[in-house]
Image (tube, coloured by chain):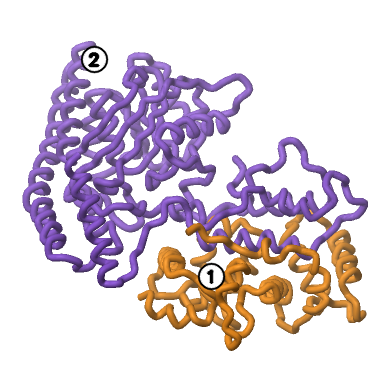
Chain colours: A purple, B orange
Amino acid sequence: RACADVFQWATLRMERGAREKNQQLYKPYSNGIIAKELVSLEQEIQEVRRSGIPAPEPEFDMSDIFSFCRRGVESIVDDEVTKRFTAEELESWNLLTRSNYNFHHISTRLTVLWGVGVLVRYAILLPLRVTLAFTGVGLLVVLTSLIGLLPNGWVKSSLSEKAHLMCYRICVRALTAIITYHDSENKPKNGGICVANHTSPIDVIILASDGCYAMVGQVHGGLMGVIQRAMLKACPHIWFERSEVKDRHLVAKRLSDHVADKTKLPILIFPEGTCINNTSVMMFKKGSFEIGCTVYPVAIKYDPRFGDAFWNSSKFGMVNYLLHMMSSWGVVCSVWYLPPMRREEGEDAVQFANRVKAAIARKGGLADLLWDGGLKREKVKKVFKEEQQKMYSKVLVGVSEDSHGSEVVRGPALE
Amino acid sequence: GTYGIAQTVRELSVISHSQITRLYSRFHSLDKGENGALSREDFQRIPELAINPLGDRIINAFFPEGEDQVNFRGFMRTLAHFRPVEDNEKNKDPNSGEPLNSRNNKLLFAFRLYDLDRDDKISRDELLQVLRMMVGVNISDEQLGSIADRTIQEADTNGDMSISFSEFIKVLEKVDVEQKMSIRFLH
């Protein structure tokens, strides 16, 4: 598209300008900045010892600490987790000052282009979009309340479907989201759960404008609450009170009941539990995978060249974020509907969750991580350090590697 | 900005400008308080470091004696120990003294992970502390004690029941320290 070409030109021009003025260039790194060892920590420590033969007495080698030490320092220089919670760095500049470190006054032409961009975005696009957004939301509330007056039946569901779709599509216009849906034959059906990777609240709008889902979430007050109650009138959604969220059995029961009723829409769930920056998929919480119904995985990948859709909730509030999105050029993303998956014999919920996660990561071109998205806010659990200690003790005492061996030493084992 | 770093660069072994910039960006992203310095909490926020049994000791190595904050210069200085050794071929300045990433200095870095009280000796207690950190609860006190005793016995040549730096170097003379204690940058 023309836009992408303009952005490429802008980047090159800036880089050329920087080089001319002998200023140093900052190039974003995409694949990590250091080369890490491919062998696991356990193997590295084992190498020092007589291989295979259990020692008569525990052998401590003073060089053991080197491996721990180096890996520790490697993680200080570059780790797999903390970078997932901030916006991805872009290779080319998309005329938003927010996203490029090289921005100085390099050339008049470039600055003028940027200035025009600002004008267009804030004076033309933003008001237009905000109006559309209000229209979309307003219509949603009004229409669903009206439809709620009808008796339950085919007419009601059909109208509800149309109303929901229409309003979400208006919201999509409000963000100027250009969405490409792939493999629509795999779209989620009633009686199932749709799971997707989570980058932003916009994910919901993107999916819901192409199909009808039952939403899951906490009951909010204020405007959100109004919208939630209105939506509930037209078709069944699952809203939890704050207190109910803690009760895992209650949550599971409500989800199961909903799924068992084939007239109800598929449930939309984001198992990561928090927004990740769209370069990776993090640990899926097992709750949705314990229910035992068909899971419809969906992968969502935003094109970073046009705007960063990631919501960094520790830095920006929701309103701030939405304004941010609406004053960007737009959102370009791809949605892949993956073939449905069921839990297999002998597979527990966690393994099933990981299988689904791997499929989504593969399709969307994202890194598949075992780390918990909750690490955005919380400290890592002590049990993972204890596992490292256990592994080392085994090596020290000379227990030979068992077949399950802790192959994942970089990431935590599964709960 | 990055120009103040030039001074630091001259002290350390050769390091490219793009690498300094990347490390500065990393330093900045770890610095949640945005005050130009890192605290111990800033390091502990890295999950992979938090689960490393020697995590706290490694973090300690960044902080000068008695200090609670490390600035970018100090950050770079500590990291400089992990530069690969072959890069020194370019740095033949006889006045610069031994570079931070020499084999000797790498060994000294590791030695100091054990030698908490900085008396240039690893006592039995200090050795036990590190061992305990690495094995957690999985080995009994008695067994750990005998492991420590055996280790000291093997290394101690002057009979003072502790390991001095030169004894430490001797024990590890066959180990490829350069490889184990180096971090290679891409580009």
Q: Is residue A409 left or right of residue A116?
A: right
Q: Is residue A16 above or below residue A42?
A: below
Closest to the observer, A169 or A256? A169
Q: Secondary structure at mark 2?
A: loop
Q: Residue at x 16, y 65 (%)?
A: A107
Closest to the observer, B26 or A396? B26
- The chain ID associated with circle 2 is A
- Let me know if residue B79 appears in the view: yes
> Residue A182: horizontal and vertical position, in percent?
32, 25
> Residue A250: horizontal and vertical position, in percent?
46, 31
Q: Residue at x 58, y 63 (%)?
A: A73
Residue highlighted by disc 2:
A152
Q: Residue at x 33, y 52 (%)?
A: A91
> Residue B70: horizontal and vertical position, in percent?
50, 76
Badge 2 amino acid: Asn
- Let me know if residue A275 appears in the view: no
Q: Is residue A56 above or below residue B3?
A: above
Q: Are marks 1 and 2 on the same chain?
A: no
- The chain ID associated with circle 1 is B
Q: Is residue A285 left or right of residue B179?
A: left
Badge 1 amino acid: Arg
Residue highlighted by disc 1:
B40
Closest to the observer, A349 or A74? A74
> Residue A408: horizontal and vertical position, in percent?
63, 44
